[in-house]
Each structure stands twice: as C-alpha cells, then as structure tokens.
Amino acid sequence: MKLANLGGRAVLMVTDTEAFDVATASAGRFGPALPAVYADWTEFARWASFWLGGSGRDSGETVAVDAHRLQAPSPEARQVFGIGLNYRAHAEESGRDLPAKPATFTKFPGSITGPFAEVELPEGGSTDWEVELVVVMGQRAHRVAAADAWSHVAGLTVGQDLSERNLQFAAGMQFSLGKSYPGFGPIGPWLVSPDEFDDPDDLELWCSVDGVEMQRSRTSDLIFTVPALIEELSAVLALCPGDLIFTGTPAGVGMARQPPTFLQPGQVVVSGIEGIGEIVTRFR
C-alpha cells in the first residue's frame, strides 16, 4: 500500500499519477486528512487491503495526482525523533566510535514539510544534507520488543534531516534547534507499508546535489535497525500513531568533506530510497 497526502487529503496510490481518495472510497469512514487515518490505522489498513485487493478498486473512481500537490505523508506528527551516527561508515567519516546506544535527538514538528518543498537557508552558511529512511508509526508503541516492532509501523518514507551545523554544534550542542528550521524535515513522496518490501531492513538510499551524487548506501549498514530503534525509544516513552523516526544518514555529508561543503541558494537536492521513490528539495 502507498498512502499519500494530496492537497491535505489521504489518497491510496494506484500509480505514481493516479489514486483513490480515501474519504470518498470509504464513504467517509476514513479520512479525509492523514491524522484521522493514523488514529484508526488498524481498521484503515484492513479496509485498504480489502479495497485494493479488488472489492472496490474495479468500480471506484480515481483522481489524478499532480506531484507538486503532494504534502508530507504525516503532516501533524506529535513527536519527531532523529538518530545520530547510525551508519557505520558515517560514524567512521565523523571520526567517532560506534555508539553503544542510539544517539537520539528531536526535530521539532514544525520543521516537517512535503516532498517538493522550497526551503529558505538560514544565516550561518552551514546547512548540510542527510538523506534518511523515515519510519511512520501506525500504532501506539510502549515497551515494544524488537520482535514485534514492525507490526506497529504504518510505513516508510524518504526524508532529509537538514542540519545547520554551526548552530547544531554551538555551545551546549544545540542538535534539536540546528535541525528544526522551517522546512528542515522534508518527507515523502508517500508512505509505503512494510509488506511492500522484500526486506524492509535492507533498502538502498541515495542523495545528490545539483545532479552530483553525494550519498549512496543501504539500510543494512544501520547500527541500530528499525526494530531496535522502536524497542529503545518505546522503552522510555510511548510512540504515537503518525510519529516520525528519522533513522540516521549514511556517509557522504558535506561536513565531513575536505573542505567542508554546504548548501547554497539555488541548489537542488534529490533524495531517494529503493521501493519508495524520490523527493526534491530546492533552496533559496
């Protein structure tokens, strides 16, 4: 299942350009907005499987999908988590030891934006790119074992954990502020449910700036897998439907280059993940 946010309404993708409007197809039972879908995720997923399996798909009317009307697939997450140094190669390029536990920080929800956003670069001149696999929670998870974690996930999406490095590493280590400027959390283009992947723990991801590849890796290089992260986080607090987990970035960030390289006005970042798709972020 691919679930998208088309102009504020939940839609089930049929192709990249065609979808079913959830509220219309379900006669108002689910939606129309994405938060209402996540609030009743178990029943929605059951209905969506039934609908897409052919019971309603053959008779339902589809809507055209203009990619530039796509918004964040979870636009009102209560909690947004980030994980630092979670790829072996990224820890190595940063000159850091592999962490014994997930290095967790928060991105404030106001930083979340859609898959084709234009983002204003803040003063400081040190904004960096970080392509990431982003988890969208589908069920409340509190004290969930890793073995049961995937059953609590609604799906996966592409994300950029944009980071203003000067502020991030300012006195006192301002990770959350440095990663939470408006638009510093583009996600999309849609959510893909875990059952759509042959192996959701081993996906290729990549990032380019103005057509030049900067990052390429696989999520099998993660130090802490998606189930491990859910177990660790849910041991402390409850994860809520629609919450986001930015799972970490692979090697190739601008800060680690010689000399360090950061984003400039007019540049375009394309970020992608196997089996999901790509998002495009423009900077001004």
Image (tube, helix red, strand yellow):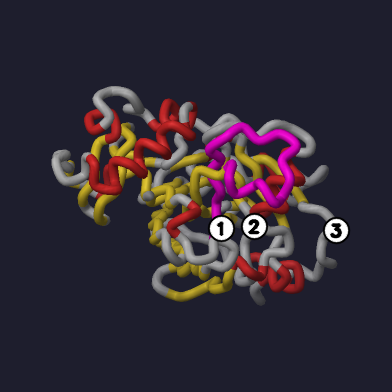
From the image, tell me which residue sits under label 2: 248
Residue type marked 1: Glu
Residue closest to the eye, 1 or 265: 1
Is there CB contact under 8 Å for labels 2 and 1?
Answer: yes
From the image, tell me which residue sits under label 1: 132
Q: Secondary structure at mark 3?
A: loop
From the image, tell me which residue sits under label 3: 100
Mark 3 or 2, nearer chain start: 3
Residue type marked 2: Gly
The residue sitting at 56% across, 44% down in the picture is 153
Mark 3 or 1, nearer chain start: 3
The alpha-carbon separation of the residues under discs 3 and 2 comes to 15 Å
Q: Secondary structure at mark 2?
A: loop
The residue sitting at 68% across, 58% down in the picture is 225
Is there CB contact under 8 Å for labels 3 and 1?
Answer: no
Residue 248 placed where, x, y %? 64, 57
Is there CB contact under 8 Å for labels 3 and 2?
Answer: no
Q: Residue furthest top?
A: 28
Image height of 78 relative to 92, above or below: above
The residue sitting at 40% across, 73% down in the picture is 211
- Crowd tier of the residue under label 2, counting other residues whose Cα lies within 10 Å: few below 14, some 14–19, many 20 or above: many
Residue closest to the eye, 21 or 77: 21
Q: Secondary structure at mark 1?
A: strand
The alpha-carbon separation of the residues under discs 2 and 1 comes to 6 Å
* Residue stretch rendered in magenta on the structure: 130-152
State left or right for residue 284 relative to residue 79. Answer: left
- Crowd tier of the residue under label 3, counting other residues whose Cα lies within 10 Å: few below 14, some 14–19, many 20 or above: few
